Amino acid sequence: MRPDGADGRPEAREIVSGRYAELLAWLRSLEGAVVAFSGGVDSTLLAHAAQEALGARALAVTARSASFARQEHQAARDLAERIGIRHRFVATSELDDPHYRSNPPDRCYHCKRILFRELLRVAAEEGLPVVIEGSNRDDQADYRPGRRALRELGIRSPFAELGWTKAEIRTRSRMLELPTWEKPAAACLASRVPYGEEITAERLARIDRAEELVRAVGVAQVRVRDHGPVARIEVPAEMIPRLTESETRQRLVAELRALGYRYVALDMEGYRTGALNEMLGDAEREANA
């Protein structure tokens, strides 16, 4: 199934081709760059473009952390090899930060500060003057307190600066035959824990395993929101009937209970980005944006 905005029309492809040339020119103006590389659709296209524009002066760096699903680490390695860009892993230690562990509404700010300070260290070590990342224009309409950390640390976001949308990123990725062009949106595992509840390595590992179990029944896009004894499963609305099939339902209930959940709930509204942000008031969002 084609994701929304992955427009294959000739006129859309022509526009995006021109936009891609503009992106390459932007990157070639740099003397070199570290690319924050998660292996998602945005960072994969950015890494591909950086390799094309900068060659050996581009380095993709992936965080190895309990906050990210295990499968994403190997996927990032494989993608970097396919793109041909130099690649490194770095360990991040956000769980050592009490601000992060306490999970305030601006948790993402503390996480991004830790991550990008580490990437700046790598950039200095490699003699590369800039760290870049894949935020796009659409992200600016969402609640993302991590953007404050990017501003404070001087991290550049070429897609956002050039006005790229997610749809354009997917279209160009498809044109380049990058396997991530239709990859579902991803987010760190901590985004499954309600604000104010402590984040631990054990809790993150349980969420990671729970989502693996849901994906194993044929659902690519999933969030298991961890409400202590309750696992609240979000999947796209059209996939809800799949999880309510008797055999699948019984299997998932048994498997998630084995992970320590007492109750297994299916969110009938379906998957949506940042569902736990719905608990924040407008004033709190504004204060942490």
Image (cartoon, rainbow, N blue to C red):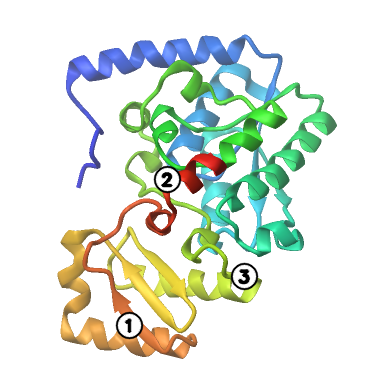
Which numbered disc, 3 or 2, marks the residue that appears first in the sequence?
3
115 horizontally vs 70: left or right: right
158 horizontally vs 91: left or right: left
Badge 3 vs badge 2, beta-carbon distance below 8 Å: no
Mark pair 3, 1: CA separation: 25 Å
Q: Tell me residue 223's x, y (percent).
A: 38, 63
Residue type at numbered disc 3: Glu
Mark pair 1, 2: CA separation: 36 Å
Q: Mark on residue 252?
A: 1
Badge 1 vs badge 2, beta-carbon distance below 8 Å: no
Q: Tell me residue 17's x, y (percent).
A: 34, 15
Which numbered disc, 3 or 1, marks the residue that appears first in the sequence?
3
What is the crowding at mark 3: few (fewer than 14 residues within 10 Å), some, or many (at least 20)? some
Q: Helix, strand or loop at disc 2?
A: helix
Q: Which residue is mark 3?
A: 198
Q: Which residue is mark 2?
A: 282
Q: Tell me residue 87's x, y (percent).
A: 66, 40
Residue type at numbered disc 2: Asp
